[in-house]
Amino acid sequence: MAYPVDSDDIAVRWRALDADEAALAEVLLEDAAVLLDNQRPVLAAAYALKPGLFLPLIRMVLVRAVKRVLANPDAVRGQTIGADGTVSISYGLSTTSTQVIDGVYIDDADLVDLDRALAAEAGGTGRRRVRSVRLLAYDEPVNRMSILPLP
């Protein structure tokens, strides 16, 4: 789904973009929106019902994804200078996400924020539900297990 997020949102939250960066940011925002819809398919329906509630969070997530690429386009992870003066540069993204398009990915923390908002809107708390636990008793001498009666 196309969300009303553009390069001006990045400029407001980060820094002014030149024409080339703004054009790249527009394309990256589209890529980030595709990833977002793939990873959270119910978000588009929730946004259609209550755009005012979900748009600020969607905007924040998409802008963060694009800022990561614009701030570090080569995905440099680190640089090491050895005692003999040699320089070693490591590359790669700092993500566990399996869905990456040209360096754009939706961070796990952003997905947690989205899940909480979706769950809260659905009437939940946004917390993972814990199932009941059944207590077991062990007979010491023979290590036999028996199920305790439920209260």
Image (spheres, grey):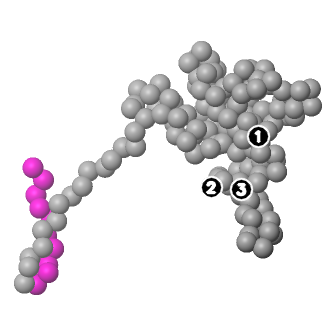
Under circle 1, the secondary element is: helix
Say which label, 2 or 3, has the lower sequence index: 3
Which quadrant does the N terminus fall into?
top right
Q: CA distance from mark 1 to mark 2?
A: 19 Å
Q: CA distance from mark 2 to mark 3?
A: 14 Å
Say which label, 1 or 2, has the lower sequence index: 1
From which residue to which does the magenta span run?
A: 142-151
CB atoms of marks 2 and 3 within 8 Å: no
The amino acid at mark 2 is Thr
The amino acid at mark 3 is Arg
Q: Residues within 10 Å of mark 2 (few under 14, many from 20)?
A: few
- Residue on which disc 2 sits: 96
The quarter of the picture where residue 29 lies is top right
User: What kind of secondary structure does the magenta stretch mostly adopt?
Assistant: loop
* Count of picture labels: 3
Observer-side mark, 1 or 2, equals: 1
- Residue on which disc 1 sits: 71
Q: Residues within 10 Å of mark 1 (few under 14, many from 20)?
A: few
Q: Position of residue 119 (x, y in %)?
A: 46, 32
Tell me the residue at 74%/50% (across/down): 100
- Residue on which disc 3 sits: 77
Q: Position of residue 136 (x, y in %)?
A: 16, 65
Does 16 appear above or below 134? above
Q: CA distance from mark 1 to mark 3?
A: 12 Å
The amino acid at mark 1 is Ala
Horizontal side, residue 19 vs residue 74: left or right: right
Say which label, 1 or 3, has the lower sequence index: 1
